[in-house]
């Protein structure tokens, strides 16, 4: 997702892509996952991308939360008893914890939409309203 939103966004001249790049540099880090039996089992599932497998395995190994919107990944998470939430949850959590302002979360949401992420108009309205409420 970083490539689509930040790298491609910068190349296309989107100003918000630089804001997201700075946020990622300050707040995100890359983790690798071991090729465990769970990894091998999930990797054999054609419906899951390599990224989906890595997210699910990392969440399982760390008792964390997998953040994904794809139905196949969410279904596998349910079967494997891995807590899973979507992109909207992640954005709301960042605003609630003070890691992002409402304006930054809205800018990221807009960049995700520009990159092809789907969000129903009524959900967009609810998210931006909630960002503002949480940011107060």
Image: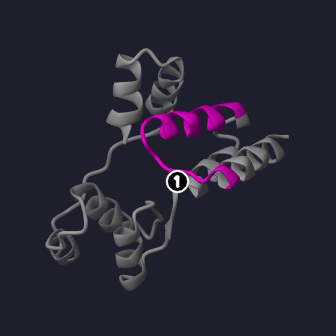
Front residue of 62 and 3: 3
Q: Is residue 34 magenta?
A: no
Q: Position of residue 117 (x, y in %)?
A: 46, 46
Tell me which residue sits at (19%, 73%) in the image: 45
Q: Residue 17 placed where, x, y %? A: 47, 24
Part of the protein shown in magenta:
103-122
Question: Who's the residue at 35% across and 69% down the image?
Answer: 73
Is 23 drawn above or below residue 127 in the view shown?
A: above
Residue 55: x, y in percent?
34, 60
**Position of 100 relative to 121 (above/below):** above
Q: Where is 70 relative to 20, above or below?
A: below
Q: Secondary structure at mark 1?
A: helix
Q: Total number of numbered labels?
A: 1
Question: Which residue is drawn at the image coordinates 64% and 53% (left, top)?
Answer: 93
Q: How is the image coloured?
A: one colour
Q: Give the left or right position of residue 16, taking residue 80 as reference.
A: right
Q: Residue at x 65, y 49 (%)?
A: 121
Decide whether the magenta segment is chiefly helix, strand or loop: helix
- Comparing 75 with 67, the one in front is 75
Q: Quadrant of the N terminus?
A: top left
Residue situated in front as seen by the camera: 117 or 91: 117
19 on left or right of 115: right
Residue beneath label 1, please?
A: 87
How far from the left and from the top, in percent, is residue 122? 70, 54
Quadrant where the C terminus is found in the figure: top right
User: Label 1 neighbourhood size at 10 Å, few (<14), some (14-19), many (20+)?
Assistant: some
Residue lying at the far front of the rendered structure:
121
* 110 magenta-colored: yes
State the image quarter where residue 13 is shown: top left
């Amino acid at each position: 997702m970083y490539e689509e939103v930040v790298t491609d966004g910068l190349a296309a001249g989107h100003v918000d892509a630089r804001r997201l790049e700075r946020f990622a540099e300050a707040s995100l880090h890359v983790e690798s996952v071991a090729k465990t039996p769970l990894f091998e089992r999930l990797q054999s599932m054609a419906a899951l991308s390599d990224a989906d497998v890595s997210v699910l395995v990392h969440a399982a190994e760390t008792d964390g939360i997998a953040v994904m919107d794809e139905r196949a990944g969410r279904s596998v998470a349910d079967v494997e008893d891995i807590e899973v939430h979507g992109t909207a949850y992640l954005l709301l959590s960042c605003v609630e914890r003070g890691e992002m302002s409402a304006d930054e979360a809205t800018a990221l949401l807009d960049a995700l939409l520009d990159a092809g992420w789907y969000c129903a108009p009524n959900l967009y309205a609810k998210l931006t309203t909630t960002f503002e409420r949480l940011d107060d």
